[in-house]
Amino acid sequence: MTITSHSGGPLDKPLAPVRRFRAEVIADGDVPQAEIYEKFIGKFSDREGLPELGAVAPSDQGAVTINGSGRFVHYEGVQAVEATFSSSCGPMSGRGTVTSWLGPVDGVLSCDRRPKPSEPIHDEAIALTCTP
C-alpha cells in the first residue's frame, strides 16, 4: 500500500490470506489424535500460547498506522511447527503428521528497504506485495 502523506496514515486494507494453519493430526490410520497432539506440544519448554487441537491460526488482526510516506506491506503470520509420527497401541495404529504453530507474528516493512537480516516471512511478504 502506498502512503503519500508526509505525516503517514493507516494501513487499513484487509489482509489477504496466503495459507491457513490448523493445529491438527493427520494420519493414515485410526490413532489417538488428542494424545498424539498433547505429546507433541509437551516437547516445547513453554506451552503457553500453543493452540488447542483443532484451532485455526488467527489472521487479520487489524490496521496499523505508519508515520511517514512510502510503499509499505503489513504482514501477519505464525511459525508453523510439525513432526511426523508413528503410533501403535492395540488395534489402533498409523503414521502421519502433527502440526501446530507458534506466534502470532506481525509487522510492517518498507517495500523500498529490505530488512537485514531478512526472515522468510519478510521475503514472502515483499515478494507477494511489493512487486512493481
Image: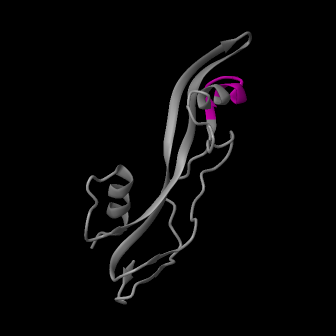
Percent across and percent down for residue 41 are: 60, 32
Image quadrant assignment for residue 69: bottom left
- Residue sitting at x 25%, y 71%: 112
Whether residue 31 appears in magenta in the rendering, the answer is yes
- The residue shown at (69%, 41%) is 52
Q: Can you give x and y, in whole percent of width and height, for residue 117 in the image?
A: 27, 52
Residue 48, above or below 83: below
- The quadrant in which the N terminus is found is bottom left
Q: Quadrant of the C terminus?
A: bottom left
Q: Position of 36 compared to 101: left or right? A: right
Using the image as rendered, state which of residue 13 and residue 8 is in the foreground. 8
Q: Residue 87: within the magenta?
A: no
Q: Residue 9 in the image: state x and y as whole percent.
A: 44, 84
44 or 79, which is in the foreground? 44
The reply, left or right, for residue 7 in relation to residue 10 is left
125 horizontally vs 11: left or right: left
Front residue of 72 and 129: 72
Please give the range of residues in magenta: 25-36
Examine the rendered structure and indicate whether residue 97 appears above or below residue 120. above
Judge whether 61 appears above or below 12 on screen. above
